[in-house]
Image: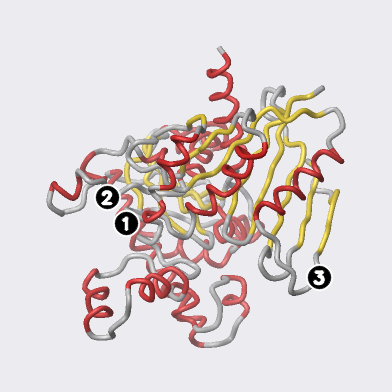
Amino acid sequence: MADVILVLNAGSSSIKFSAFDAQSPDLALVSRGQAEGLFGAPRFAAFDARGEQTGAHAWPDGSTLEHAQAITHIADFLRAHGEGHRLVGVGHRVVHGGAHFTKPVLIDANVIAELDALTPLAPLHQPHNLKPIRIIAERNPAMPQVACFDTAFHAAQPALAQAFALPKSLAEKGVRRYGFHGLSYEYIASALPDLAPAAADGRTVVAHLGNGASLCAVSAGKSVASTMGFTALDGLMMGTRCGNLDPGVILYLLDEMNMSAREIEDLLYRGSGLLGVSGVSGDMRALLASSDARARFAIDLYVYRIAREIGSMSAALHGLDALVFTAGIGEHAAEIRRRVCEEARWWGIELDTDANARGQTRISTATSKVGAWVIPTNEELMIARHARSVMDRASR
């Protein structure tokens, strides 16, 4: 009987899952899929390691599915299609670990309470990350669960990179730069030695470009600086989030526009970014296909902000040896990669246009001073690695 580690990544209206063979050295993928559209048009899909669909279900339009029901459906599917498999643990992506949780941790009631207290720092993510943890703890309290944090990879950044220019009393209360997308960056750092040894040993800027977007300055595999700070709202322009913003704008919205804190939160998290600027969509695919001038302007601003922040990350590294694109937009939007690389020509990036158009791993020329790469991220595998390691230590 094969032991399986289940990885869950829960959002507000979806739960992604991946099951890995815990006994294989490289944690071979067994199954993956998701339940999405939970509160509108719920649907489920599952795939095997070869990418072939093994399950699908759609509920009637207008149906709603709570997270608990979605987990039940996922569990029922895995039991029905996992003959010979035994679930031995569950790993979870948790966006915010605060200052205390700087490495993966075995979950208990105290850990859940501490993570719940961090919800104000990641209001869009933390409550949903914790839902499956609570559900599984209630249904099967003996099942080991491991929390893996998007902030942990950045925890060892220099103190200067973590500090705001605010009174020390606020820093002592936890007001500092944390950084996010750490599981993605950690995976890229683990993949670089095989794909690009020089980049792994040198100074690399990794661009995690998805609906959420950030850059990370990585030196010899370690996080040195990142564009996201106290919350996942900071830094680059994103799908619906504004990214970097003059704090005076918040005061203006409060004093002159008479907006409440919750209205401002909704604007900055859900009504800004690509969606807010374009007025068309927060989905890069739709914007690239659009002829609307506002869509083109939103793309221009998106590229401009990335190019500026590459300069910032390069300054933190005191130079640049490689640029890596990852996540949905980074892996699939050749036009965005092309335009970012063209903006970064001054660093010595020479783009191989054919390689970029084909989505090859290396997209810079052989003579390029700075290498440019496309590396698919795998946060789920990173979580499974951590979960196995934590459970192994706990069992000794």
Residue closer to the observer: 267 or 70: 70
Question: Residue type at mark 1?
Answer: Gly
Q: Which residue is painted at 56% across and 61% down in the image?
A: 329
Q: Which residue lies furthest to the front in this view?
A: 138
Amino acid bearing label 3: Pro
Label 2 close to label 3 by CB (< 8 Å): no
Q: Which residue is drawn at 59% across and 64% down?
A: 333
Label 1 sits on a secondary structure element that is: helix
Of 359 and 268, the residue lying toward us: 268
Q: Where is residue 103 in the image (x, y as percent from the top left)?
A: 43, 32
For the residue carrying disc 2, how many other residues have a C-alpha within 10 Å: few (<14), some (14-19), or many (20+)? Answer: few
Residue 204 relative to residue 52: left or right: left
Residue at 20%, 52% in the rendered image: 164
Percent from the top left, x then y, of residue 45?
78, 55
Q: How crowded is mark 3: few (under 14 residues within 10 Å), some or many (20 or more)?
A: few
Q: Quadrant of the C terminus?
A: top right
Q: Which mark is residue 60?
A: 3
